[in-house]
Amino acid sequence: SHRIDIKADDEIGEISVNFNIMTEQLNISLKLINNIISSMPSILFSVDWDFRITQWNNAAEVFTRRVKFFFFNQPNINL
């Protein structure tokens, strides 16, 4: 995430404040989604258009006996 330092007390400053609020709300939402995905009892993983793994939950780790970070952004993974 990136926060903007607010240096102006005008429209630009107001936009900066709103940007920081939206950034914080997005970070909270992403953490919530990641917590939900991680704690799901079902195996879940996702891949991008190049078939690189972009999401891998705890149930997938248990089932495959492989740590999720081993697979991230690796092309053509054979599970």
Image (cartoon, rainbow, N blue to C red):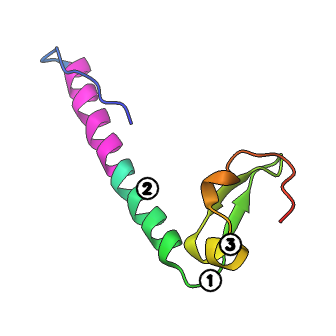
Magenta stretch, main secondary structure class: helix
- Residue type (three-letter) at the residue carrying disc 2: Leu
What kind of element bears circle 3?
loop
Q: Nearer the viewer, mark 2 or mark 3?
A: 3
Cα distance in 3D space between marks 2 and 3: 26 Å
Furthest-front residue in this view: 65
- Residue type (three-letter) at the residue carrying disc 3: Arg
What kind of element bears circle 1?
loop
Give the labeled residue for mark 1: 42
- Viewer-proximal residue among 68 and 17: 68
Horizontal side, residue 3 vs residue 31: left or right: left
- Residue 39 magenta-highlighted: no
Furthest-bottom residue in this view: 41
Start-end of magenta stretch: 11-25
Q: In the drawing, what numbered circle is on residue 30?
A: 2
Q: In the image, is residue 35 above or below residue 71?
A: below
What crowding class fits label 2: few (fewer than 14 Cα within 10 Å), some (14-19), or many (20 or more)? few
Horizontal side, residue 42 vs residue 49: left or right: left
Q: Nearer the viewer, mark 3 or mark 1?
A: 3
Q: In the drawing, what numbered circle is on residue 33?
A: none
Q: In the drawing, what numbered circle is on residue 65?
A: 3
Q: In the image, is residue 47 above or below residue 59?
A: above
Residue 65 point in image, percent of width and height: 68, 72
- The residue positioned 83% from the left and 66% from the top of the image is 79
What crowding class fits label 3: few (fewer than 14 Cα within 10 Å), some (14-19), or many (20 or more)? few
- Viewer-proximal residue among 68 and 47: 68
- The residue positioned 32% from the left and 50% from the top of the image is 25
